[in-house]
Image (cartoon, helix red, strand yellow):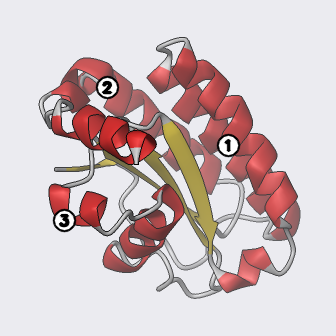
Amino acid sequence: MVRFLARLVKHLCYPPWRLRRVLPERALQAIAQAIAQSEREHTGEIRVAVEAALDWRRLLRRQSVRERALEVFEKLRVWDTEDNNGVLIYLLLADRQVEIVADRGLARRVGPDEWQRICQAMEAAFRQGRFAEGLLAGVAAVGEKLKRHFPGPDRAGNELPDRPCLLS
């Protein structure tokens, strides 16, 4: 119960405007450029979504970061790519946790342990307050997985936006 209350307070005290403080426009542009550059080397799609905090309803349901990432994966239609090789990198700032959700085409080739290692490296940067650097490293690491398993230029064009999605 104490952990739940601590999380509730942390999320309620983490307003949406903190997204812009942590990820200013120049950081968002750098991430979008990194995604665009990566996608020139493979047929996959990378999507980054960042959320300041969960709303009180999700908190009362004790929604996990993974559960929220799966919702966002669906909402942003990351699953809707030609080769089923879309990847979502989801960051929940209040918890300083990241989840990577890969569509079935890539999930068959890359195991959860590999995604967890990428997440852990990103979270180490987040603990130091280096959010843009952590996300850029995550984009690069995911891009390497996509390049290994889905090499070549993107033949379907850019199916998903490169700019990070800021959820509020």
* View extreme (top): residue: 128
Please report the residue visible at 62 percent of the width from the left and 54 percent of the height from the top.
40
Separation of disc 2 and disc 3 at Cα? 25 Å
Please report the residue visible at 34 percent of the width from the left and 72 percent of the height from the top.
76
Residue at mark 2: 23
The reply, left or right, for residue 87 in relation to residue 106 is: left
Please report the residue visible at 66 percent of the width from the left and 23 percent of the height from the top.
124
The reply, left or right, for residue 47 in relation to residue 85 is: left
Residue at mark 1: 119
Where is residue 37 drawn, in percent x and y?
57, 43
**Residue type at the position of mark 1:** Cys
Please report the residue visible at 27 percent of the width from the left and 43 percent of the height from the top.
8
Q: Which badge, 2 or 3, comes first in the chain's sequence?
A: 2
| SS state under label 3 | helix
Q: Is residue 83 above or below residue 109?
A: below
The reply, left or right, for residue 8 in relation to residue 112 is: left
Q: Is residue 5 above or below residue 58?
A: above
Where is residue 48 drawn, in percent x and y?
44, 51
Nearer the viewer's eye, disc 3 or disc 1? 3
Mark 2 crowdedness (10 Å alpha carbons): few <14, some 14-19, many ≥20: some
Where is residue 81 drawn, in percent x and y?
52, 83
| SS state under label 2 | loop
**Residue type at the position of mark 2:** Leu
Residue at mark 3: 57
Q: Which badge, 3 or 1, comes first in the chain's sequence?
A: 3
Nearer the viewer's eye, disc 2 or disc 3? 3
